[in-house]
Amino acid sequence: MASPQPEHIRFDLQVIASLIEPGSRVLDLGCGGGDLLAWLAAAKDVRGAGIEQDKDKAARCIARGLSVLHGDLNTEVEDYPDASFDYVILSQTLQQVYEPARLLRSLARIGKRVIVSFPNFSHWTIRLQLLWRGMAPKNDQLPYSWYDTPNIRVITLADFRRFARDVGYRIVREIAIDTASSSGKVVEFLANWRATYGIFIIEQKNSGGA
Amino acid sequence: MTAATGQSGPAAADSVEKRYHRFAEPPDTMALESGARLGPITVAYETWGRLNEGRDNAILVAHAFSGDSHAAGRYAGESGDDKLAWWDFLIGPGKGIDTDRYFVICANILGSCMGTTGPSSINPATGRPYGLDFPMVTIGDMVETQKRLLDHLGIDRLLTVIGGSVGGMQVLEWCRRYPRAIRSAIPIATTMRHSALAIAFNEIARQAIMADPNWQGGNYYDTGRSPDLGLAVARMVGHVTYLSDQAMRRKFGRRLQDKNDFSFGFDADFQVESYLRHQGSKFVRRFDANSLLYITRAADYFDMTQRPEPVDAERPDIKYLVVSYSSDWLYPTYQARELVRRLKRAGRDVSFCEIEADCGHDAFLLPDERLTNLIRGFLHGIAAA
């Protein structure tokens, strides 16, 4: 199986990969060409599975030896038994989900922990565009115009914290990252202003997980 | 017992040979799912590549209802003009199923007429062809004969079992019946059970044969008359279900065959009529009408959902690759997704991909790089694990 060099995968995926213990069972939703899964399998001996809506990308994953289903993640996640996975990854997709609360409930059912990443809508470039230009903002992470965007949700780090609490999840870990620079870095200070993406690990409150 | 290693003589490198394995000699006949017993049984099979020392590079190819053991390569003496074997684009040196790496086996199914025992074979009890005295066989019985063949070849565990259509049903049956004997499974363009639509078309095909006066209750073999017209009509119906609206529009449309105007009669005016008649009469030359009855029946009876997997905590994890085609209306993608759903619920390791193709059910028999790449990569993953 062709496994990518870690520096060749997206920075947010590198951060996500670093959070996963070796030997875990992982489901990657919207796994694209399978870079993260291939790297996790090669470097961390992870038993991975993926769901990808794009036929060609799904076929590419399978052709590199990954276990990947071509299908819609909103419905595909329904069929797994409870706690099938140690981690379920939803990277850069939450902002396109029609029923986020319902999806997250499914994810928390089939995975012990859920890793969610999304573009941060309260990044300073976005705030300034709205404040000074008075137009729907665009940046590298959210490059679409209002009329052609697949992103039907605008989420900030603060929004997600409240959402997670309201729908009954414990935030195990929160990492803010800035991918505006070429290599990408973790943001500690003024995260809600400076982070381009937020990465959260959540679990069900009653799971009592370690 | 014949060991499969070392069987490949110098000639086997460039041509393939049909071999026969005979077993279930009376009184040790084979019990069928129906409760009947059958024996002796001959299985016709072909192999490609070499079984390695570890005996762990074997792949079983299960053919579709009217197929045969000749999945790839050429028989000795065949010229370049002969029709290619049915999966020649997929199986061979350097191909998707690479015979430089894998030992590939394909056996003609029980009930067929391409060398394996079926209704046209001689019934040892009477010295005449079985006809309808041939017991009803199931997909499970077909798999059982394949297992006996593999035992004979000294293969305990297959790298994969792969097949399309009725071949895909055999793949699923292998997973249920012999999960320890396979590492992975590739069911293609198939279903867990026939829909009413699929049964309906099969029934039309069977009725076409049985309504032909030359069928004679199935005992036509020694009479000098055979239900050729019925069999041809059955094949015409089959061919329509293997195509699609798009494919037929593209291939034929309303174009006329070798004429500029209607004949105002019942000749084959349209190209599509001419095509179906041609397919019908071609099929009559190579296939037995009773075999069609038996095999379509076996396919109609097949139902994975009524056959729960045996509870087995130590059941090994079979890796599945399910493939469907977007324009297949015989076994549509929703049926492949039902299979995937069932496998997921059982906690199985499953990959699924629908291939976009307008050729209908028959797409799995047409050269397609996408299928080749899927299978090549999937097999590499299994072999490396």
Image (cartoon, rainbow, N blue to C red):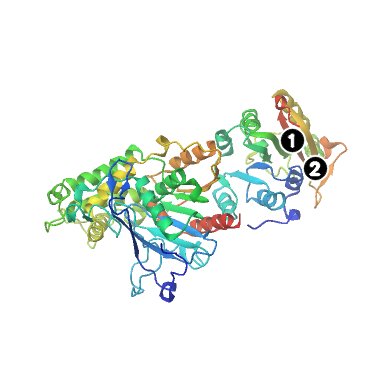
Q: Measure the alpha-carbon separation of dots 1 and 2.
A: 14 Å
Q: Secondary structure at mark 2?
A: strand
Marks 1 and 2 belong to one chain? yes
**Residue under the image location 21 percent in, 58 percent down:** B261
Please state the horizontal and vertical placement of residue B335, each as a whole percent of the image.
43, 40
Please state the horizontal and vertical placement of residue B247, each as a whole percent of the image.
37, 53
Disc marking residue B210 = none
Callout 1 amino acid: Ile
- Closer to the camera: disc 1 or disc 2? 1
Asked if residue B246 shows in the view, the reply is no
Q: Secondary structure at mark 1?
A: strand
- Horizontal arrangement in the rendering, residue A26 relative to residue B132 (left or right): right
Disc marking residue A201 = 1
Dot 2, how many residues are within 10 Å of its Cα: few (below 14), some (14-19), or many (20+)?
many
- Horizontal arrangement in the rendering, residue B95 relative to residue B46 (left or right): right
Q: Which residue is mark 2?
A: A177
Say which label, 1 or 2, has the lower sequence index: 2
Picture quadrant where residue B204 is located: top left
Outermost right residue: A189
Please state the horizontal and vertical placement of residue B292, each as a whole percent of the image.
26, 50
- Work out which quarter of the rendered image holds the N terminus of chain B and state it: bottom left
Asked if residue B5 shows in the view, the reply is yes
**Residue under the image location 66 percent in, 31 percent down:** A108
- Horizontal arrangement in the rendering, residue A140 relative to residue B66 (left or right): right
Please state the horizontal and vertical placement of residue A139, each as a whole percent of the image.
75, 44
**Residue under the image location 69 percent in, 24 percent down:** A167
Circle 1 marks a residue in which chain?
A: A
